[in-house]
Amino acid sequence: MSAEEHKELAAESQQRVAIAIVTVSDTRTEETDKSGQTIRQMAEAAGHQIVDYRIVKDEPDQVERALHDFAAGLAQMIIFNGGTGISARDRTYDVIVRHLEKQLPGFGEIFRMLSYAEIGSAAIMSRATAGTYRGCVIVSIPGSTNAVKLAMQKLILPEIQHLAWEITR
């Protein structure tokens, strides 16, 4: 079966994917969380459902708690935004990667390639990643609104149904 046939079959069986959003930030609130709002708007416009949303500080225990809580809930996919850089406070990647059961290295590789086309060599500082954890697809992307739009448009939304379908097979 070709990749395109796989995606078509997945779209038929996983029309609406349940998504949890976690914004990792020491400063954002629900009112100022433009990136979380962008994920919500783009996902809902594509016909998917937001089942959970949380803003957490860039503290390992808070990131880990959100991961465990949402993986135990209704979410088929959990999208983390923020905390993927290399500053001392950027710890999302470190927490997420410890828990991934299967990594999807192509996600981060392609995200950085696409980012390079937009922002140049600064793309090397992104630690965007994806994988699986307890029956959920986990995606971790930078918190900038431009990065969120790029990831959603080019990687997440084109494959979301396929990913959700594959995780249950």
Image (cartoon, rainbow, N blue to C red):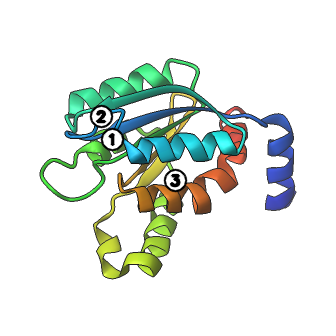
Task: Point out the frontmost of discs 3 and 2.
Answer: 2
Residue 131 in view: no
Q: Is residue 75 left or right of residue 128?
A: right
Instruction: Name which of mark 3 and mark 1 comes first in the sequence.
Output: 1
* Crowd band around label 1 with a 10 angstrom C-alpha radius: few (<14), some (14–19), many (20+): few
In the picture of the structure, the residue carrying the numbered disc 1 is: 32
| Furthest-left residue in this view | 88
- Which residue is depicted at the point 21% across and 40% down? 27
Q: In the rendering, which numbered label is found on residue 29?
A: 2
Three-letter amino acid code of the residue under disc 2: Thr
- Residues under labels 3 and 1: Cα distance? 30 Å
- Which residue is depicted at the point 43% across and 60% down? 147
Three-letter amino acid code of the residue under disc 1: Thr
Q: Secondary structure at mark 3?
A: loop
Image coordinates of residue 168 in percent, x first then y, are 69, 32
* Crowd band around label 2 with a 10 angstrom C-alpha radius: few (<14), some (14–19), many (20+): few
Q: Is residue 54 left or right of residue 136?
A: left
* Crowd band around label 3 with a 10 angstrom C-alpha radius: few (<14), some (14–19), many (20+): some
Query: Residue 46 falls in which quadrant of the image?
Result: top right
Q: Secondary structure at mark 2?
A: loop
Q: Secondary structure at mark 1?
A: loop
- Which residue is depicted at the point 42% across and 20% down? 69
Q: In the rendering, which numbered label is found on residue 104?
A: 3
Residue 47 in view: yes
Q: Is residue 18 above or below residue 153?
A: above
Kindly indicate whether the residue at mark 2 contacts the one at mark 1 (C-beta within 8 angstroms): yes
- Residues under labels 1 and 2: Cα distance? 5 Å
Image coordinates of residue 92 in percent, x first then y, are 29, 43
Q: Is residue 33 above or below residue 50?
A: below
Three-letter amino acid code of the residue under disc 3: Leu
Depth check, front residue: 48 or 74:
48
Q: Quadrant of the C terminus?
A: top right
